[in-house]
């Protein structure tokens, strides 16, 4: 493909026609061979005669191998010698408009290159070679020094920009690529067309990139083990120490040159830059170093050699750790997991902590060598990767002792924002946080608007949404892009919390259009929550699963927590108990979340309580509820970021429905008054679901009148009103709408309610319709254990005989074996099992073991 190369192609044609030789230079996968193919076609269309020879690495030491295998000087029985081969090549180039193309020149044998050079000097024909970028200057493929050097024009195969890469990939796939998926392909490949096509082909084969409608969409993380061979090619000819150096840079992530220099020798850095395996990024007065192409970082992290990664981590610590005052904290830190991790989770957590430990050492050395606001912010981010209270001392020292005037105004604004958030969310001192922001605005120019965004965020998260939030978050054209992004991100937070989902979608689009500013994890998570509120559950789930897989692959703990929290709300929304349970195991295994953003820890513990009760793990539920109850600070502004959810679920399980509803209703009232309307409405509806009253339903209807975008919440309200009126058909209408909007568990619960009503009234038509809708939903959604009981968990009580049968079934016994054990008929056992599965809303017998509390 030559997309994005038209200007270079036209220039190359002009040069060849002028008799000038060309070097086409690029990295692996840069499209050198495709460019030569397009150039050859252009010239042949103009009556040029092109002879093409390709170098072969394994035959590099066989004289004349490349020419002979190209059919030049190859006789019927034996290959021609040097003179005969030269004559054969010259004969093919007798045409007055001839050119010689040498693809993969680096792999050419010396004899073939010698003949080509000789003919070029003798005849003056232009020679086009394609060679790798970054190899040291030389005059022959093996590096022999020549006394003369023919001049040639160099055409660099630079990475494609986003637009041209998108055109190339869309053409390759015969269809457009969804925007966020294309963004990930571009980010991973770094614009390298060959690497991007290899990635696309591998992920299509493994159904990680799938066609949905007219677009190609990433179904999961875009990483394939099939990419290993492609990426290993980038590491060819690197000696052990150079390869170690490249992997060390990948482990530490983006770091300053001074810090990397303590880990890697100058000669090695120069070699890596020559090979285009590292890139320098200017960041104010300092230079940062990163590995390129980015997929190499992913390759290193997926490498199944834990010992190697641990060795390199220890090497980093040996070279930098002794000078860091935080080393003792880092070396002794351990994850306080709330669950015993499974083996895959244990491996993930181990690698996560090894990487976090190395990053902390690197960032500590960088900050201690040059204590600027920029290095301070990066160091604190590293300290909070696997946060524990033990890191508090170091964080306070860094944010408190760094001189604000030692950096640019953009970095000063970031450090001031960090100080304010720490005071608000860790010290729980709102007044001190606001004072930091107020005093820090002087001298920041347009970057003072960043502090406006932080002030709105903090007030909304702790106290209440400011009345003038719209004015404080206004975006004007003259602002720097980074400031616009900060303001728009907090706008997105506020609009989602206000349940203004259409406006939130508009702001998310505006954020995605800001160039040269990365989309943050929080922006993606908030966009997904807005999609859930609008009723686009499936799209939100797919986006979050992709983002979580990506974060998991990159060992990005902040991404795992942020996307994990949003995906947990998504699973809670749909009632997918199985997916939620697996997700929480991974998240809890990684350790406690950081103190901010506000509410994340509350959400995990509250959802953990709901999940544990609904799986019958009451002891775990009580532990989670106790922890969330003792967390300091205020409830967060997003759904389920409140201790009331944990308390209500336990009270409901204990049969105290009125108390459970009261706790949730009071929490929702406070959230509504603070401006957290989305969270308030979700809690209002849950309270009314536990114990409905006309006053509560009227209040919910009034609140919903100010949030016209909240279609999901309106459908839930319609179900509760229909059930309160004992209107079976209206209940089923609501069930169908809820299912369409992704509230699968609530939809199935509505079907159960309609079946109960039909049984009481002996309404055959209603019963048939309810069963038909129920079957349709379960058939479409698969056999997953969706949460139907919800807050009615205690109502799924079994008789003693049913518990006895269920306990035996949970051990794996068949109906026949249970019948023999209890001296019952098989038909009687089948009847008991049918009632057990219906009461516990289980889709298969193997799920009985997870519902141990119900079997006690």
Image: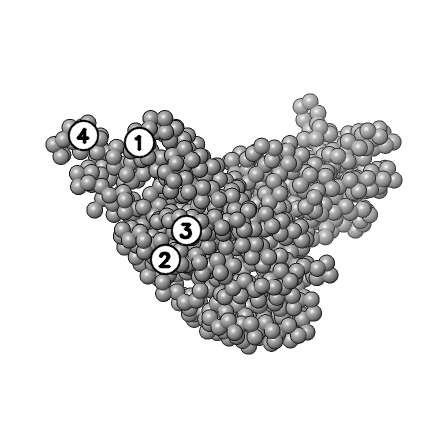
Residue nearest the viewer, comparing 289 with 580: 580
Secondary structure of residue under mark 2: helix
Upstream in the sequence, badge 4 or badge 3? 3
**Tags 1 and 4 in contact by the CB under 8 Å rule?**
no
Q: Residue at x 62, y 49 (%)?
A: 506
Question: In this figure, which residue is indicated by the disc labeled 2?
Answer: 663
Secondary structure of residue under mark 1: helix
Question: Residue lying farthest left?
Answer: 823
Label 4: few (<14), some (14–19) or many (≥20) C-alpha neighbours in 10 Å:
few
Question: In this figure, which residue is indicated by the disc labeled 1?
Answer: 761
Residue nearest the viewer, comparing 147 with 42: 42
Question: In this figure, which residue is indicated by the disc labeled 3?
Answer: 696
Question: In this figure, which residue is indicated by the disc labeled 4?
Answer: 828
Upstream in the sequence, badge 1 or badge 3? 3
Residue 642 sits above or below residue 140 on the image: below
**Tags 2 and 4 in contact by the CB under 8 Å rule?**
no
Q: How far apart are marks 1 and 4 (CA)?
A: 27 Å
Label 1: few (<14), some (14–19) or many (≥20) C-alpha neighbours in 10 Å:
few
Residue 302 sits above or below residue 337 on the image: above
Can you give x and y, in whole percent of width and height, for residue 841 in the image? Answer: 32, 38
Query: In the rendering, which numbered label is found on residue 177?
Result: none
Secondary structure of residue under mark 4: helix
Q: How far apart are marks 2 and 4 (CA)?
A: 43 Å
């Amino acid at each position: 493909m030559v997309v994005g190369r038209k200007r270079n192609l036209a220039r190359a044609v002009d040069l060849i026609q002028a008799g000038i030789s060309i070097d086409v230079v690029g990295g692996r996968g840069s499209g050198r061979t495709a460019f030569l193919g397009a150039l050859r076609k252009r010239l042949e269309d103009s009556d040029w005669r092109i002879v093409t020879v390709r170098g072969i690495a394994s035959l590099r030491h066989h004289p004349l191998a490349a020419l002979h295998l190209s059919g030049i000087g190859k006789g019927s029985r034996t290959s021609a010698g040097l003179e005969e081969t030269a004559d054969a090549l010259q004969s093919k180039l007798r045409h007055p408009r001839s050119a010689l193309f040498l693809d993969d020149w680096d792999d050419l044998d010396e004899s073939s290159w010698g003949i080509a050079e000789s003919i070029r000097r003798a005849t003056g024909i232009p020679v086009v070679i394609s060679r790798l970028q970054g190899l040291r200057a030389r005059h022959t493929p093996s590096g022999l020094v020549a006394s003369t050097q023919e001049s040639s024009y160099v055409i660099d195969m630079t990475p494609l920009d986003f637009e041209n890469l998108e055109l190339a990939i869309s053409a390759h796939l015969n269809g457009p690529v969804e925007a966020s998926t294309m963004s990930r392909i571009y980010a991973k490949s770094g614009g390298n067309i060959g690497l991007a096509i290899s990635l696309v082909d591998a992920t299509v084969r493994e159904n990680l990139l799938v066609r949905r409608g007219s677009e190609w969409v990433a179904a999961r993380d875009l990483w394939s083990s099939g990419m290993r061979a492609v990426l290993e090619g980038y590491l060819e000819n690197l000696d052990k120490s150079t390869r170690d150096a490249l992997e060390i840079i990948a482990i530490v992530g983006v770091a300053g040159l001074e810090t990397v220099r303590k880990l890697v020798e100058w000669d090695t850095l120069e070699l890596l830059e020559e090979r285009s395996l590292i890139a320098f990024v200017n960041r104010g007065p300092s230079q940062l170093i990163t590995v390129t192409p980015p997929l190499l970082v992913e390759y290193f992290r997926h490498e199944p050699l834990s010992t190697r990664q641990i060795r390199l981590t220890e090497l980093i610590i040996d070279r930098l750790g002794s000078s860091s005052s935080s080393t003792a904290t880092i070396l002794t830190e351990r994850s306080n997991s709330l669950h015993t991790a499974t083996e895959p989770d244990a491996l993930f957590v181990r690698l996560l902590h090894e990487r976090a430990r190395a990053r902390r050492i690197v960032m500590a050395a960088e900050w201690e060598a040059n204590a600027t606001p920029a290095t301070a912010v990066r160091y604190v981010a590293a300290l909070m990767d696997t946060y524990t209270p033990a890191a508090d001392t170091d964080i306070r020292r860094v944010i408190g002792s760094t001189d604000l005037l030692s950096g640019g105004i953009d970095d000063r604004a970031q450090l001031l924002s960090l100080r304010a958030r720490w005071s608000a969310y860790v010290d729980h001192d709102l007044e001190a946080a606001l004072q930091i922001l107020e005093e820090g605005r002087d001298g920041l120019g347009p970057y003072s608007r960043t502090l406006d965004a932080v002030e709105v965020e903090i007030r909304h998260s702790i106290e209440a949404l400011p009345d003038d939030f719209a004015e404080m978050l206004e975006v004007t054209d003259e602002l720097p892009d980074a400031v616009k992004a900060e303001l728009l991100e907090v706008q997105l937070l506020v609009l989602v919390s206000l349940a203004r989902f259409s406006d939130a979608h508009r702001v998310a689009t505006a954020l995605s259009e800001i160039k040269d500013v990365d989309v943050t994890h929080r922006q993606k998570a908030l966009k997904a929550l807005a999609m859930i509120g609008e009723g686009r559950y499936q799209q939100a789930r797919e986006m979050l699963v992709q983002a979580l897989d990506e974060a998991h692959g990159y060992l990005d703990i902040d991404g795992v927590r942020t996307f994990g929290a949003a995906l947990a709300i998504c699973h809670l929304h749909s009632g997918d108990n199985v997916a939620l349970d697996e997700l929480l195991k991974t998240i809890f295994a990684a350790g406690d979340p950081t103190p901010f953003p506000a509410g994340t820890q509350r959400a995990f513990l509250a959802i953990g309580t709901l999940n544990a009760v609904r799986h019958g793990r009451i002891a775990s539920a009580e532990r989670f509820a106790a922890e969330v109850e003792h967390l300091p600070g205020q409830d967060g502004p997003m759904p389920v970021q409140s201790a009331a959810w944990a308390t209500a679920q336990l009270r409901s399980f204990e049969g105290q429905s009125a108390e459970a509803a009261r706790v949730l209703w009071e929490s929702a009232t406070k959230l509504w008054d603070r401006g957290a309307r989305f969270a308030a409405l979700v809690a209002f509806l849950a309270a009314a679901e536990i114990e409905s009253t006309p006053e509560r339903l009227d209040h919910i209807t009034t609140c919903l009148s100010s949030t016209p975008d909240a279609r999901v919440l309106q459908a839930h309200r319609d179900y509760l009103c229909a059930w309160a009126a004992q209107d079976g058909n209206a209940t089923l209408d609501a069930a169908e709408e809820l299912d369409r909007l992704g509230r699968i568990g609530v939809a199935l619960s509505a079907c159960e309610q309609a079946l109960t009503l039909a049984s009481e009234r002996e309404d055959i038509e209603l019963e048939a319709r309810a069963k038909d809708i129920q079957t349709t939903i379960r058939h479409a959604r698969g056999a997953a254990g969706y949460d139907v009981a919800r807050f009615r968990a205690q109502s799924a009580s079994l008789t003693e005989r049913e518990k006895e049968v269920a306990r035996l079934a949970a051990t794996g016994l068949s109906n026949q074996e249970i019948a023999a054990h209890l001296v019952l008929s098989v038909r009687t056992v089948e009847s008991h099992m049918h009632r057990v599965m219906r009461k516990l809303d289980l889709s298969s017998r193997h799920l009985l073991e997870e519902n141990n509390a119900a079997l006690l």
